[in-house]
Amino acid sequence: MEMKITVIGMWGGYPKKDGPCSGYLVEQDGFSMLIDCGSGVLVKLQEFIDLNEINDVLLSHYHYDHASDVGAYLFSRLVNTQLGRVDESLTIYGPQDEMKEQEFTSVPYTEFQAIDEESELHIGPFQLNFLKTIHPVETCAMKISNGKKRFVYTADTSFTKGLVDFAKGADLLIAECSLYEGMDGKNSGHMNAREAGMLAKKAGAHKTLLTHLPHYGNIQKLVESAEKTGAAAVELAQPGMVITI
């Protein structure tokens, strides 16, 4: 009953060469779901799984660096369904947005289900719970459990005590870290490295990956700042990194 999490991409804002924006593949017992599908994710994803083998896609919010590749993915599923390579509809889960729902469901073989912090989903072997974060658009952090282990993804957010409670005891915490220590991300809805470390420390996370990384500065400094808080086992997320819990 091991849960396998593969980092597909982790850059904030826009991708780098061979480095997509946010995307995480979660697998267990032959079931696969994709968490976020930002710019560059769709190409990199195919190094790890056939696109037709993904059962569901969950989007934390609709900023381009988290959702821009979804449209191409829906077209892929449409074509491959017509070719007989896949025979089940793809469900997209995300915050309620009528325009996005119409956009997604206008593509045949695609379904949409809205999520908010009251939602509790049971998808494949996983239970999923959500928390509304502090970000300029409706955004949901996600907690994914297989009954024994817990993986928490903050999505984009500034630091909140509610997030500490939500991430309590996480076996793996993937925490956004858009800014360097001393920078203030409250207005933009982002955390700096010290805040990401504080979250990991206060939540008692067993392992933490810093994600949604900035395109400037020495990103190893992010880890150093997070570690100064006493957070355990902090690393930078990297494309292709696999964590099994």
Image (tube, grey):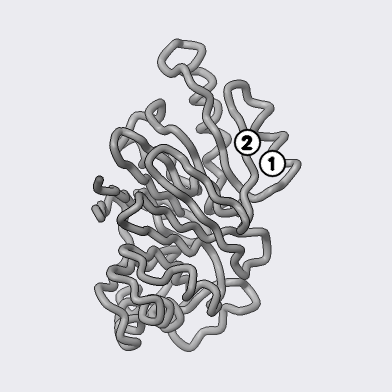
Q: Earlier in the sequence, mark 2 or mark 1?
A: 1
Q: Which residue is mark 2?
A: 112
Using the rendered image of the protein, determine whether residue 218 is visible from the camera's viewpoint: no
Circle 1 residues within 10 Å: few <14, some 14–19, many ≥20: some
Q: Nearer the viewer, mark 2 or mark 1?
A: 2
Which residue is more in the foreground, 79 or 143? 143
Q: Amino acid at mark 2?
A: Phe
Q: Where is 24 relative to 11, above or below? A: above
In the picture, the quarter occupied by the C terminus is bottom left
Which quarter of the figure has residue 196? Answer: bottom left
Which residue is more in the foreground, 85 or 38? 85
Q: Amino acid at mark 1?
A: Lys
Circle 2 residues within 10 Å: few <14, some 14–19, many ≥20: some
Q: Position of residue 225 (x, y in %)?
A: 35, 84
Left or right of residue 96, residue 149 in this image: left
In the picture, the quarter occupied by the N terminus is top left
Q: Position of residue 96 (x, y in %)?
A: 69, 48
Q: Residue drawn 37% across and 40% down?
A: 45
Q: Position of residue 108 (x, y in %)?
A: 62, 21
Q: Position of residue 217 (x, y in %)?
A: 39, 76
Left or right of residue 71, residue 240 in this image: left
Q: Residue drawn 62% across and 49% down?
A: 115
Left or right of residue 232, residue 155 in this image: right
Q: Where is 29 relative to 185, above or below? A: above
Q: Where is 18 relative to 165, above or below? A: above
Q: Which residue is mark 1?
A: 100
Which quarter of the figure has residue 29? Answer: top left
Left or right of residue 102, residue 112 in this image: left
Contact? badges 2 and 1 (CB < 8 Å): yes
